[in-house]
Image (cartoon, rainbow, N blue to C red):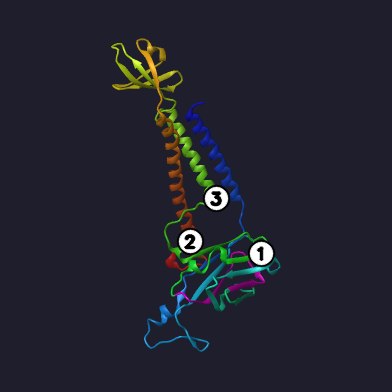
Amino acid sequence: MNSSDIVGILGIGISIFGILLSIYLARRKKEEFVLICNDPIAIFTDLVEKKEDFTISYKSRPIQEGVYIVRFTLFNRSQRDFGSESIHLPLTIKFSDKILCIESKILLSPTNSVFNITHSDSRLTINWDLFRKKEIVSFEVMLQTSRVAVDSKEIIDKNSLLFRITELDEIQIYTDEYLTEGYFTLFPGIGFSVWTAILGLFLIFFYWLAQIDMIRSDTIYYKVMNKDKSISSVSIWRKHSDVYKFSYEDGTTTYDKLENYFEDRVVTGLEFRKNEGIIFWFTPLILSLAFATFAMTGLGFVVKTIRKRKFKKIGLIPKTFA
């Protein structure tokens, strides 16, 4: 078995694995929520400083720097409803110890359902009696921190969420930065499986190139003495079947049999060229990795664009973000 055959078999194996994994993950429906955190509005910096002789107070106390209003939107993107009986630990947002939650309220909730929101120190808890699939609840929080400027990534991340709800697999967190930026790489989950399939297909492509003689494999390097006693360096590789191709200093030719070439020549030795084997193995692999990653980057951008349009359609994000 030559090296090109190994690359071909490797490509087929990786492709089959990636395709089967993609099918499995595509069929496995995740039950998940989406939590969108809009960029915080600094009450003092964004509102008060821009107006002369204008002050804002909260509970008779003037608002200074470090007070922010943040809007959250929770979307049930799963395929099922979640009643109160499924909640063992309500959804809780745990902010940093340096961020204090001083006020919270529901802005928008589904009809015929009751949603409650409570806060204490650096925690915010959301509870409900029934949260149906494809429904949305929006709430607003007033936060206080000693920092002059914060963004949504500093307010919430994956580690900020605490919950134990039956059949709920995950809560995805999206920020304004994610919704508005143009670059996105889809890598986890089904993205990885598709990336693997692309990698395998590209290795198969290199195997095909090797078979049509665009990539030389199994090359042997000879030191050959010609009729005139001169020494030539000749590389010989199998083109197909028993046809061999010869490359030397002054040209390239093809012989049906090795014997035809060596009739009037004497082999004086073999050359060992280490780099040829390394290049053959690593060049296809590196190019395949680069191509697969580039393809997944483009696919991720398309998926993100479609997702943003869906969110816009159901009112999760403003039109200016789409």
Q: Nearer the viewer, residue 93 or 321?
A: 93
Chief SS of the magenta region: strand
Q: Which residue is mark 3?
A: 190
Is residue 129 highlighted in magenta?
yes
CA separation in Å, label 1 and label 2: 26 Å
Image check: 151 left or right of 28?
left
User: Given the image, on which type of amino acid does mark 2 rest?
Assistant: Lys
- Density class for disc 3 (Cα within 10 Å; few <14, some 14-19, many ≥20) is some
Percent x, y for residue 217?
Answer: 43, 28
> Element at badge 1?
strand
User: Given the image, on which type of amino acid does mark 3 rest?
Assistant: Ile
User: Of label 1 and label 2, which has the lower sequence position?
Assistant: 1
Q: Which residue is mark 1?
A: 165
Percent x, y for residue 235?
Answer: 37, 22
Compared to residue 152, the image places residue 2 above or below, namely: above
Front of the two marks 3 and 2: 3
Q: Which mark is residue 93?
A: none
Q: Which mark is residue 308?
A: 2
* First to last magenta residue range: 123-147
Residue drawn at (65%, 72%) of the image? 128
User: Of label 3 and label 2, which has the lower sequence position?
Assistant: 3
